[in-house]
Image (cartoon, rainbow, N blue to C red):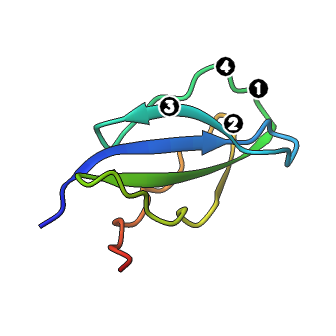
């Protein structure tokens, strides 16, 4: 079985701009800092497995700064 080694988290600038990598983490949670209240940020992530293959990007999730987003779904193996 393949093991997930890390997740790569991306976010836009709060103005629907380009996504930028903000963190590569081994856990399933991350606290994003320095968001401006009232802006709507978009997030997406990729999982990296034990043979260094990246998953497709997750579905984009939007949140307004100052709110707590719902938990992402489980990563899916793409063959």
**Left of 68 or right of it: where is 40?**
right
Q: Are there few (<14), some (14-19), or many (20+) residues within 10 Å of tag 3?
A: some
3D distance between C-alphas at marks 2 and 1 = 6 Å
3D distance between C-alphas at marks 2 and 4 = 9 Å
Residue labelled with disc 4: 34
Q: Image quarter for residue 35?
A: top right
Which of the two labelled residues, at mark 2 and mark 4, occupies the earlier sequence position?
Answer: 4
Identity of the residue drawn at 51% across and 52% down = 45
Which of the two labelled residues, at mark 3 and mark 1, occupies the earlier sequence position?
Answer: 3
Look at the numbered disc 3 and give the secondary structure of its residue: strand
Residue 36 is tagged as 1
Determine the residue located farthest toward the bottom in the rendered image: 79
Look at the numbered disc 1 and give the secondary structure of its residue: loop
Q: Nearer the viewer, mark 3 or mark 1?
A: 3
Residue labelled with disc 2: 65
3D distance between C-alphas at marks 3 and 1 = 18 Å
Residue labelled with disc 3: 23
Q: Do the residues bearing badges 4 and 1 touch, measured as CB atoms within 8 Å?
A: yes
Identity of the residue drawn at 32% across and 73% down = 77
């Amino acid at each position: 079985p393949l093991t997930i080694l890390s997740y790569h988290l991306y976010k836009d600038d709060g103005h629907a701009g380009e996504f930028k990598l903000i963190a590569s983490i081994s856990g399933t949670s991350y606290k994003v800092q320095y968001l401006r209240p009232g802006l709507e940020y978009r997030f997406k992530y990729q999982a990296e497995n034990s043979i260094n293959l990246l998953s497709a990007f997750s579905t984009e999730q939007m949140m307004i700064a100052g709110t707590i987003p719902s938990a992402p779904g489980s990563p899916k193996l793409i063959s």
